[in-house]
Amino acid sequence: MLDGGSGEARCSASGCGATAAHALHWRNPRIHSADRVKTWAACDEHRETLAAWLRSRGFPVTATAFGETVERIA
Ligand SMILES: [Zn+2]
């Protein structure tokens, strides 16, 4: 495990300091083009919570393991 060095990512959920195991890639279609990708880090507990929050706003979301990247979001 990482020991708190710069490579360790924390969950993006408000008030959560858990180590992120997942990444949520998303964009806002009203202001971002298809090749613009925003990424949130998420722990096991918040992956679905954060994805649901994004989807509820009509934002396309792609979930991956943390550290993976996506080129674009359909
Ligand atoms: Zn979390």
Image (tube, rainbow, N blue to C red):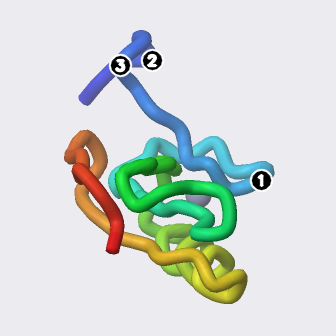
Of the pair 50 and 62, the residue shown nearer to us: 62
Crowding near pointer 3: few (<14 within 10 Å), some, many (20+)? few
Residue that label 3 marks? 7
Query: Sequence order check: which comes first, mark 3 or mark 1?
Result: 3
Residue that label 1 marks? 14
Residue at (24, 56) in percent of width and height: 65
Label 2 and label 3: CA atoms lie apart by: 8 Å
Residue that label 2 marks? 4
The location of residue 70, given as percent across then percent down, is 24, 52
Q: Is residue 59 left or right of residue 56?
A: left
Using the rendered view, name the quadrant where residue 63 is placed: bottom left
Residue at (26, 62) in percent of width and height: 64
Of the residues shown, which amino acid type is indicated by label 3? Gly
**Ligand 1 lies under 8 Å from the Cβ of mark 2:** no
Residue 25 higher or lower than 60, as above or below:
above
Q: How many marks?
A: 3
Residue 40 higher or lower than 26, as above or below:
above
